[in-house]
Image: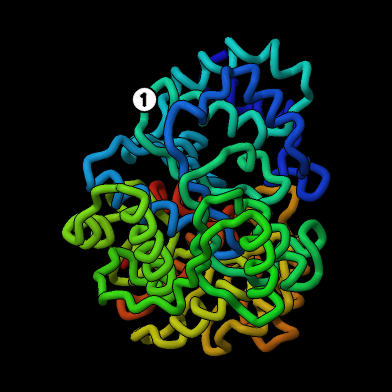
Amino acid sequence: MNYRETIEYLFSRMPSFENDGKSGYKPGLGTAMRLDEMTGKPHERYATIHVAGTNGKGSVCHLLAATLQQAGLKVGLYTSPHLEDFSERIRVNGVPVSQDYVCDWVERRRQEFEKLSPSFFEVTSALAFEFFADMAVDVAVIEVGLGGRLDSTNIITPQLSVITNISFDHTDLLGDTLAKIASEKAGIIKKGVPVVIGEGGDEDVRNVFREKAASVDAPIVWAEEVNVPALEVELKGDYQRKNARTAYVAVEALRRLGYGISESDVQQAFAHFATMTGLRGRWQVIDTEPMVICDTGHNPGGFQYTSNQLRQLDCRKLHVVFGMVADKDVNTVLEMLPHDAFYYFCAPNSHRAMSVSELMSRGRGRGLNGDAFESVEKALNAALSNASSEDAVFIGGSTYVVGEALTAFKKITYKR
């Protein structure tokens, strides 16, 4: 199989949460552990850092990976989902896994792993862990896929655990209270392994973390209680300030573990972390005149920052290309959006997407003026055609919308 056929095989043969929603989510560590044994337990051949949380975990992973790389280490980085290409998920020092490696690994391992009926994410995690071993990384930063306790990445014993924050998302899978969600995220806390909590939240959430950490003798650090120096961060989303604080406190924890990370390393890495690691889609400015910004935020916890920043944009008129998946808290997000923008409602190419007619109906019911478009590309094309050089275009609501828009942007031409 060539690369395109290999990726299609993985998505079509393996159930995936991204394509199938709840039916594609396979909680539990049994299959992940069997895959790990099949590949020789590769994650035991390098150090790991494990990052969970509702929002910000991707950015924190990239901040940590960039800092470790700046300090001279060979760094693996495993995140999800991707925006345009599968290889974005698995990187070493910012370079994506090669297409040849993916094809060869799947061809070599498929007869073994097909017997286990694994999920897409379980197979992808096994691929990433073995790739990092083959590349002889010093350390790998591993992002939890969903939750924590039953996530297939939770077979690792990291040197440091990080939990960014807790807010409502995936409530049908993780629980309908913040304390229940926190309990799932706290599942990555391991015996004797220090844990950094980015935002503790309410007292019920803090108690969940305290009790879990105490039960396994894991030292706990609350990033909110640590004075952090002012740092320049490459991406300018308001929420990045909190992500930077969490990452900085995590770096301090790594220093206590013996990592030789200088303050200059931190400053350089934070100022260039997206460039160093390939991170995109976080309040990313992809053009000017008009200013075009995309952001992958997709739940109320993320939009509490994004919506406020949209209202503060210095522009004549705001155009918003917007789509969401149906299993998110769509109504709450719509209620948070600015009313003085024009919306280009669309649906990404995903079985989980909310239909554009339903999304537009809900949006208009909440005072959002706009029209429906049958694809992200057509919505983006219309927004760019209508926007003057003094306007701004925002693309968001879903990782899938941003991914499709980034692909479409490369081939769209429009009059400025």
| Residue in view at x 32 percent, y 75 percent | 228
Amino acid type, label 1 = Ala
Along the viewing direction, whichever of 392 and 266 lies nearer the viewer: 266
Instruction: Determine the image quadrant of residue 335.
Output: bottom right
Residue at 74% in and 18% down? 114
Colour setup of the view: rainbow
Tag 1 residue: 136
Residue at the image point whose x is 70% and y is 60% from the top: 325
Where is residue 81? Give x, y as percent.
56, 47
Reply above or below: 14 against 289: above
**Residue at position x 60%, y 49% in the image:** 191
Q: Position of residue 369 (x, y in %)?
A: 62, 83
Is any part of residue 191 visible from this angle? yes
Residue 356 visible somewhere in the drawing: no
* Nearest the eye: 266 or 310: 266
Residue 255 lies left or right of residue 281; in this view the side is left
Rendered image quadrant of residue 54: bottom right
Q: Is the C terminus in the top left, top right, bottom left or bottom right quadrant?
A: bottom left
Judged from this view, the residue extending furthest toward the left is 264
Q: Secondary structure at mark 1?
A: loop
Where is residue 156 shown, x and y percent of the image?
Answer: 57, 38
Residue 128 against residue 184 in the figure, above or below: above
* 360 over 114 or under it: above or below: below
Between 375 and 160, the one lying in front of the other is 160
Q: How many marks?
A: 1
Q: Is residue 166 left or right of residue 391?
A: right
Image location (x, y in percent) of residue 330: 71, 72
Dot 1: few (<14), some (14–19), or many (≥20) neighbours within 10 Å? some
Which image quadrant: the N terminus? top right
